[in-house]
């Protein structure tokens, strides 16, 4: 029977889950895969974690070299997090010809080309299913399941923390601050929540997923990013009244104008499959020219869901004769002939406070019309003191036109745009 020795670097949430699955499923993998997968060593300085998982003392190593130099270890699972130390560890392992499996999206988003070049040079594998949307097998789907297709559009809710916060705001009508505290108390949000709420985590994942979907390098620097920190409960309620749900959406599109990649809050129509992805759940919706629409849904974080993806990579690497690398030239910068759209198109939600006087609505429509922006729906309510609130949804327009129109309206004495949010129609 084929033997696979694994070293796990970091025994936190994900590394611990990986240890548990590998320990508990040893007989299962022998039976189903003909593989005897054993954890040979664990690098974890926290003795309590080692004790909690019952790691035998002889398996606890104190430095990376011990794990990498062990001839019985062929796969290194990197779960230490962070970037620079992880990069050094992973490069060291690849140089030694060891296959690396990682859940580290920031590492892959920033150093994928260097790591892949090193892996190829040393006939080692580099696998990262767990880096994108945890337990949801989206990387494998893009590489294997839909390879017959040209994919021109991919949209996802790929961060569970922000989806939990926005769901709380939508369902309970609470403020961003209250929902964030709830996310922290449940352990979804970190004490410094910026990686999630400012959209960095989703941007890392989107840069990887868009590269795989479009078969070309989509660097992190090309991802437009806006977080959820300034979303108000009023906007969520107004969007809900119009039949929309607010999500932190990751969008990758390819058109004649070029590739666009963006992460920002966006309203999705209530009847879109992504609208019902709530709480800490994630989903990716993609459209292939042969298969049509496909949606994958599941847990994007957590110990066993993420470990499930890591273990599937270990099994994949062990059961395929050759390692799999990118389907494109994985250079740090994009290929010269690949065009990135300078501007993107979207529909928009605008909330305005306006003077409640004859002709004001016509003047607002006229400003929007000058920028070729057409209104789909509109609601109006009294705001007191001679003012009213207008909430409107536009047809698709270029972002630049929408921003210019907003600046023009804000320069008038009859209208103030309180908020602008994108809408995925
Ligand atoms: N913090 C991420 C999330 C999970 O909330 O989805 C890991 O990427």
Image (cartoon, grey):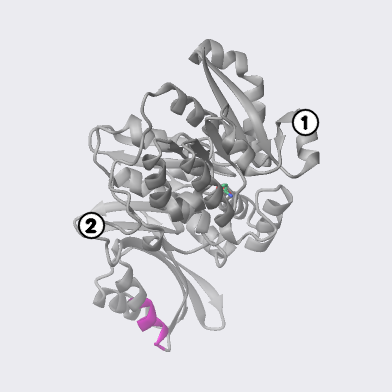
Q: Nearer the viewer, mark 1 or mark 2?
A: 1
> Which residue lies at the image location 33% right of the left edge and 81% below the top edge?
363
> Which residue lies at the image location 26% right of the left edge and 75% below the top edge?
371
Observer able to see residue 30: yes
**Secondary structure, magenta segment, majority class:** helix
Secondary element at tag 2:
loop
Q: Is mark 2 within 8 Å of ligand 1?
A: no
Residue 407 sits inside the magenta stretch: yes
Secondary element at tag 1:
helix
In the rendered image, the vertical position of residue 145 relative to residue 217, given as above or below? above
Between 382 and 48, the one nearer to me in the picture: 48
Q: Which stretch appears magenta?
A: 405-412
Between 196 and 287, the one nearer to me in the picture: 196
Q: Is residue 30 left or right of residue 366?
A: right
Disc on the earlier residue, 1 or 2: 1
Percent coordinates x, y for residue 43 in the rendering: 67, 40
Which residue in the structure is indicated by mark 1? Answer: 57
Which residue in the structure is indicated by mark 2? Answer: 338
Residue 290 sits inside the magenta stretch: no
Percent coordinates x, y for residue 6 in the rendering: 58, 30
In the rendered image, the vertical position of residue 127 relative to residue 202, given as above or below? above
Percent coordinates x, y for residue 276 in the rendering: 50, 42
Q: Is residue 369 left or right of residue 242?
A: left
Q: Is residue 59 left or right of residue 383?
A: right
Q: Is residue 397 left or right of residue 220?
A: left
């Amino acid at each position: 029977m084929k033997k696979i020795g694994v070293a796990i670097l970091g025994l936190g949430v994900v590394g611990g889950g990986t240890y548990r699955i590998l320990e508990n499923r040893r007989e299962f993998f022998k039976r189903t895969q003909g593989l005897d997968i054993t954890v040979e060593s664990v690098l974890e300085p926290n003795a309590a974690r080692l004790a909690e998982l019952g790691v035998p003392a002889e398996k606890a190593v104190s430095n990376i070299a011990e794990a990498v130099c062990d001839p019985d270890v062929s796969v290194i699972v990197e779960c230490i997090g962070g970037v620079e130390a992880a990069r050094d560890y992973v490069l060291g392992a690849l140089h030694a010809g060891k296959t690396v499996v990682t859940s580290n999206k920031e590492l892959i988003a920033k150093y994928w080309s260097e790591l892949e070049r090193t892996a190829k040079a040393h006939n080692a594998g580099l696998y990262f299913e767990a880096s994108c949307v945890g337990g949801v097998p989206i990387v494998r789907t893009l590489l294997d399941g839909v390879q017959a297709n040209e994919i021109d559009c991919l949209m996802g809710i790929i961060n569970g923390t922000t989806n939990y916060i926005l769901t709380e705001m939508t369902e309970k009508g609470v403020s961003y601050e209250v929902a964030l505290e709830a996310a922290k108390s449940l352990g979804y949000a970190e004490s410094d929540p910026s990686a999630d709420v400012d959209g960095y985590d989703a941007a890392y994942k989107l840069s990887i997923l868009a590269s795989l979907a479009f078969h070309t390098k989509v660097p992190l620097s090309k991802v437009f990013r806006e977080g959820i920190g300034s979303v108000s409960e009023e906007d969520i309620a107004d969007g809900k009244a119009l039949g929309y749900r607010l999500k932190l959406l990751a969008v990758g599109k390819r058109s004649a104008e070029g590739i666009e990649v963006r992460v920002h809050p966006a309203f999705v129509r209530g009847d879109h499959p992504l609208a019902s992805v709530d709480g800490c759940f994630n989903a990716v919706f993609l459209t292939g020219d042969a298969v049509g629409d496909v949606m994958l849904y599941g847990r994007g974080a957590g110990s066993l869901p993420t470990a499930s993806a890591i273990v599937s990579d270990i099994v994949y690497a062990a059961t395929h004769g050759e390692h799999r690398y990118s389907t494109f030239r994985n250079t740090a910068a994009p290929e010269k002939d690949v065009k990135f759209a300078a501007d993107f198109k979207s529909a928009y939600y605008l909330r305005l406070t306006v003077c409640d006087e004859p002709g004001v609505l016509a003047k607002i429509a006229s400003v929007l019309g000058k920028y070729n922006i057409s209104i789909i729906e509109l609601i109006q309510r009294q705001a007191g003191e001679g003012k009213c609130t207008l909430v409107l949804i536009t047809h698709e327009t270029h972002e630049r036109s929408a921003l210019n129109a907003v600046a023009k309206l804000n320069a008038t004495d009859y209208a103030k745009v309180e908020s602008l949010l994108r809408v995925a129609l």
